[in-house]
Image (cartoon, coloured by chain):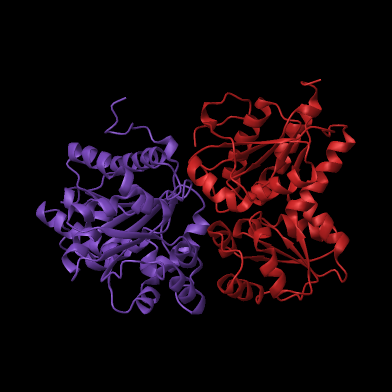
Chain colours: A red, B purple
Amino acid sequence: MPNSPENFPIGVFDSGIGGLTVLAAIRELLPHEPLLYLGDTARVPYGTRSAETVQRYSERVASHLWNRGIKALVIACNTASTYALESLSRAGEELGIPVLGVIEPGVQEALAATQHGRIAVLGTEGTVRGGRYQALLRAGGHEAEALACPLFVALAEEGWVKGPITQAVAERYLGELNSNPDTVILGCTHYPLLAQTIQNVLPDVQLIDSAQATARSLRTSLSERNLLARSGTGSMRFLVTDNIERFCRSGRVFLGHLPDPVELIDLNAASAPFLGNNE
Amino acid sequence: MPNSPENFPIGVFDSGIGGLTVLAAIRELLPHEPLLYLGDTARVPYGTRSAETVQRYSERVASHLWNRGIKALVIACNTASTYALESLSRAGEELGIPVLGVIEPGVQEALAATQHGRIAVLGTEGTVRGGRYQALLRAGGHEAEALACPLFVALAEEGWVKGPITQAVAERYLGELNSNPDTVILGCTHYPLLAQTIQNVLPDVQLIDSAQATARSLRTSLSERNLLARSGTGSMRFLVTDNIERFCRSGRVFLGHLPDPVELIDLNAASAPFLGNNE
């Protein structure tokens, strides 16, 4: 049954390369699945854009993936999960396609893991200001501290994931935590690359890796719908909206190998219901 | 004569906030001038985009500034200067408006300053790969080493312009220089903020600040055309294409004070086609 829904790929999208940590976690947990990754590299980063802009960009990306045929959509970007999960979930419901963000799964695991209810979230400036982690944790009964660590993204993209400089940056940021957390959510797709350094600085906390949490949540969602691929070797394909060369170069750090095959696409050329104006 | 050309503002544009170092240098050298800054914050950063994309974005920004009425255009962005100076200069010539990039002025000052002809350029990945500094220095008789220092941008935006972490990052990058330069061009608009740290690491080199070089070149260009404002208190106005709040917050580090007034504009709503476009 090559065209039955369980053989469709899982769509995974991010503004750039950060979502590759989520892709890698899905690949590891669900090795039989065909995976289709879209990095919106013409508009990266989403983290510093306004809410309206992030929502518009995310809808355009989702339309493109839906038109290609996917069985599930993973928003592998904290900023897009903050601002666009609601509208994309509604649209996915109409299409019968489950839509997952990276925030809820991390929050659920943190709520299950915390010993004393002291949870902190590390994220980009946009994620911290967006406040979705804090709101969901509050709904789960816990006030959480959220801390922006902007340099972590640049360090991860540079491949400086450990060593004295990264350690010093982590000490400086994490020294600002006031709440003595027992559980810390890595609330940015780049941060799992720095997990070891962060753990060195905070040896007693339980780190929650949103990428792995999202992969587990995806498995549950597909299983409930009988959409899991049961056999086959799986596959990965990549779409980007600009600069393939840079995507491949930086992507290697995130994925552990060169992304391949990569195709350059033009989201403005697609005809789809969500489509708004040119960027 | 309020509407005579010398009273028109000087247009200065960058993909984001980095160009504010150029704006500040112009303000200091030409305090009587009205300055109009456009930060294309909806599309920042240009440094990781393809050449075609940077050119398209730059042309859209220039059209907008031309439509508002400016007496000169400064491309305060190394990436846009690399890929769009030529087409914007052609269009500016038709309009009788001088167009300056940030690269040529820095190169001229470096060629004048070097003692032994050993010049190095520090820039973003995009500027280094674009190769315009290297080509112009070669045309001036010198092979130059170019080094990308991506973390400098994140450090400047975080406001960590000195201290042990910034020092360690600078030592790591600058330790990669092979050519024992006597003159080093700060080939990214963010880098002048780190000038003191860079000088600490390389105490014997002459640093060339492209922002100041560009301001001096602008003064010459306006003076030759009799377009200098001779009196008045000058002024600054700011246009951004997304996220005013973040522009103000980060802009303060670059400008030394809060950018004000700032207006949000939509470049897609601009009616005039790019003047140099033949289509």
Q: Nearer the viewer, residue A31 or A170?
A: A31
As drawn, B228 above or below A8: below
Residue A59 at x, y = what percent? 63, 36
Residue B21 at x, y = what percent? 35, 63
Q: Residue at x 85, y 60 (%)?
A: A111
Quick check: B129 left or right of A182?
Answer: left
Q: Nearer the viewer, residue B38 or A63?
A: A63
As drawn, A77 above or below B212: above
Say if residue B10 shows up in the picture. Answer: no
Q: Residue at x 53, y 37 (%)?
A: A241
The quarter holding residue A62 reads top right
Quick check: A66 left or right of B276?
Answer: right
As drawn, B201 above or below A82: below
Residue A270 at x, y = what percent? 56, 26
Q: Nearer the viewer, residue A128 or B77?
A: B77
Q: Nearer the viewer, residue A33 or A18?
A: A33
The quadrant of the rendering that contains the C terminus of chain B is top left
Residue B143 at x, y = what percent? 24, 58
Say if residue A171 shows up in the picture. Answer: yes
Quick check: A84 left or right of A45?
Answer: right
Callout count: 0
